[in-house]
Amino acid sequence: MNGMLAAGQTLVTEEGEKVTVAELFGSGGQGEVYRVRTRNGDRAAKWYYPQLADTRQRRILDGLIDRGWADDRFLWPRSIVTSPDSRVPGFGYLMDVRPDRFHGLPELFRRDPSVSATTVRTLVTAALHTVEAYRTLHSRGIAYRDINWGNVFFDPATGDVLICDNDNAVVEGEDAGVAGTMDFMAPELVRQEQGVQPGIQTDLHSLAVLLFLLLMNHHPLDGALALGIRCMDEPAKRKLYGTDPVFVYDPADARNRPVPGEQPTVIATWRALPKILQDLFVATFTRGLRNPGSRVRESQWRDALSRVLDAVTVCRSCGRQNMTEPDGPAPQCWKCGRTLVLPPLLTVTTGTGTLRTHRGIRLEPHARVYAHHLAHDPDRHDFTAVVGEVTEHPRQPGRFGLTNRTASAWTVRRDDGKVQDVLPGRTVGLRAGLLLEFGGGTEAVVRD
């Protein structure tokens, strides 16, 4: 296999279970990853390069494994493995094998055919899932330390994400020995300011860079200034990302604007990005570059991305999906340039008293209402928990209704005051002014 471990070699876990090395998956900056056979099926084993298998890394792994985190969005370390006969020095750890449906972000950025199914809706969904995954990590006081495009994998069909390389995540304030990847590091880390360590605040910068790349297919600080650099070596990167970072769309500093003809993708994608997301990127990459406390929090990204996802609209002329401004006017299609025809809007109201939350869902054909739409402050968006679905009348093409996909009845009130129940599996026709009561104090109204 041309790796540190040989096929057929035996490793042993701390619990005494023997596992057998099968094949080399690949290698990275810290070590090599192998497929191994265990009594519970195949697992992946990361084996550290000798110079990195030190007591600090062992301590970090022990802490991560002791937490026993079962979040399915993370390939979390499960058990430390060693060579029982000390034939190979050092150690590694077991984790689950990454399913084949998950692809790396670099495949997306280079337009690899393997991710050709990716749509605008999928990209926004992947961004939303990524934010929620790191929000969960940070809520436990754990900093990831090295958020970059090599650690996040996504399903191009669903937008589901999987976070890998979690062996450097540590409790906030602890030393991990990892500063990050230069292109994603917060400016204060790039400048190597005294006393500054990677943590949750620096993670927020890295997360914003990742989101910008995911939605814009471009780095937020690579504009005209980057094109003017003849050799993109470490000193050049330190200036670009640390000592003189300028957002490509900084409203007060145009030095680093994308260059027409040279950087057309980011120009086109920024123009098509809803203002609610533009404003968050501007905040993080202007004030947030200078003041870490001004960086956009995960909850802000989550709420904005969720609203944009619910407002994705298909162009009736060319069939392409478009991000639109929630509750905003109809924009022009990014592909054909024609003004979009916005479908009816379902405004959902949840919560009680002053804690009422309002969400708008564009009722495209086959649009769905999910359980998270009916929750005041959902921790996680679950796109398998379907509450209702927009369906077309079987005998009257072009006429649509909302079908009840739950096990409980809804109550609807028409604009003429008539009240009726919508039983599970039944459909209510969509018309402006229709009021729906989903139960639990959640109601919705259809608007043009």
Image (cartoon, rainbow, N blue to C red):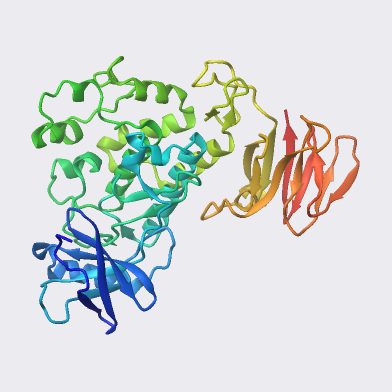
Q: Is residue 193 visible?
A: yes
The picture quadrant where one finds residue 225 is: top left
Q: Is residue 284 visible?
A: no
Q: Is residue 422 above or below residue 447?
A: below
The picture quadrant where one finds residue 3 is: bottom left
The residue at 20%/74% (across/down) is 9
Assign the N terminus to one quadrant of the image: bottom left
Q: Residue furthest bottom?
A: 16
Q: Position of residue 163 (x, y in %)?
A: 36, 55
Towards the viewer: 117 or 50: 117
The picture quadrant where one finds residue 54 is: bottom left
Assign the C terminus to one quadrant of the image: top right
Q: Is residue 260 above or below residue 393?
A: above
Towards the viewer: 214 or 283: 214
Q: Position of residue 136 (x, y in %)?
A: 42, 57
- Left or right of residue 34: residue 129: right
Q: Position of residue 376 (x, y in %)?
A: 60, 52
The residue at 49%/40% (across/down) is 122
Q: Position of residue 365 (x, y in %)?
A: 68, 35
Q: Is residue 185 above or below residue 133?
A: above
Number of residue marks:
0
- Left or right of residue 344: residue 417: right
